[in-house]
Amino acid sequence: MLRVAVVDECPIALRGLAAIFADQADMQVVAAVPSPAHLPREEDGRVMADVVLCDFDRPQCKVTSEANVRSLSASADLLVMSDSWEAWEAEDVLVFMLRTGARGFIPKNATEGTYIKAVRQVAAGGVYVPSRSDQLKEMSGADTEAAPVPSLSPREREALVWIAGGYTHQQAAVRMGVSKATVDTLVARIRAKLGVGNKAELTLAALRYLRSGTD
């Protein structure tokens, strides 16, 4: 049984999300609480859940968010929820959260199917971050199954890991022993091949390669 916990200060949101997962035969809602401090824990301090969905509605508060993310992700797969995709993307907070330990991000206006898919994906060892195209497909009812990931060259994979890890193109170039212009070209190829545009999507792509051993 997959144990799911939901953290959100809004009682209505808590009730709705809990109902979504309670309807799944293989899922058990172990907690629906207003803050991480209210989550049930084992004697060793670990959260009594396999997946925790937690609302971080103030992406600019990195210090507070980092402490919560590190604490939660140390004992459960953490899915971050927020109303504001634009704020997270503009502040690069999503990239920050993924590096800090979160296993994904989900907009709070996502469909029930997307919530279930995201929870299952992270519980299975994956990372979930929807792209803009994923959201458009979902809204139109189109198939949202991920397409096969195109192959990257060894140099492209190396550049992907450095850039997604927070290094600038110049810093990556120094570590790779190439020029910044070469890194610029490699990143442009990566974006074209993988269909990614922002740092969050690049980070997700890098995590997928590292976890799956692709190529």
Image (cartoon, helix red, strand yellow):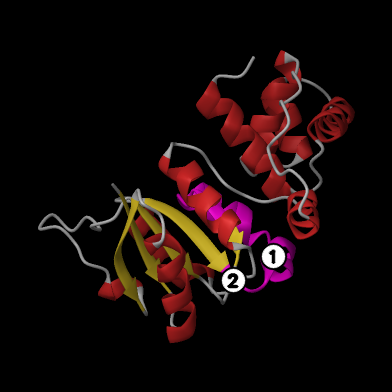
- Residue visible at 82% across and 35% down in the picture: 191
Which quadrant of the view contains residue 165? top right
Check if mark 1's residue and mark 2's residue have beta carbons within 8 Å.
Answer: yes
> SS for tag 1?
loop
Question: Residue at the location (63% across, 74% down)?
Answer: 83
Which mark identifies residue 91? 1
In the image, 104 versus 146, the foreground residue is 146
Viewer-nearest residue: 50 or 102:
50
Q: Which residue is mark 2?
A: 59
Amino acid type of the residue tagged 2 in the rendering: Pro
Q: Quadrant of residue 177?
A: top right
**CA distance separating discs 1 and 2:** 8 Å
Q: Relative to 46, say whether 146 is above or below.
A: above
Whether residue 109 is situated above or below residue 13 in the rendered picture: above
Q: Position of residue 101 (x, y in %)?
A: 45, 49
Q: Which mark is residue 64?
A: none
Q: Residue sitting at 36 percent across and 77 percent down?
A: 35
Tell me if I can see residue 200 in this picture.
Answer: yes
Side of 129 relative to 138 (left or right): left
Q: Amino acid at mark 1?
A: Glu
Residue 160: x percent and y percent? 70, 31
Q: Residues within 10 Å of mark 1 (few under 14, many from 20)?
A: few
Q: Answer whether residue 109 is magenta in the image.
A: no
| Pick the front one: 117 or 206 | 117
Q: Nearer the viewer, residue 57 or 65?
A: 57
* Residue 167 seen in render: no
- Label 2 neighbourhood size at 10 Å, few (<14), some (14-19), many (20+)? many
Residue interval drawn in magenta: 82-105
How many marks overall? 2
Is residue 95 rendered magenta in the image?
yes
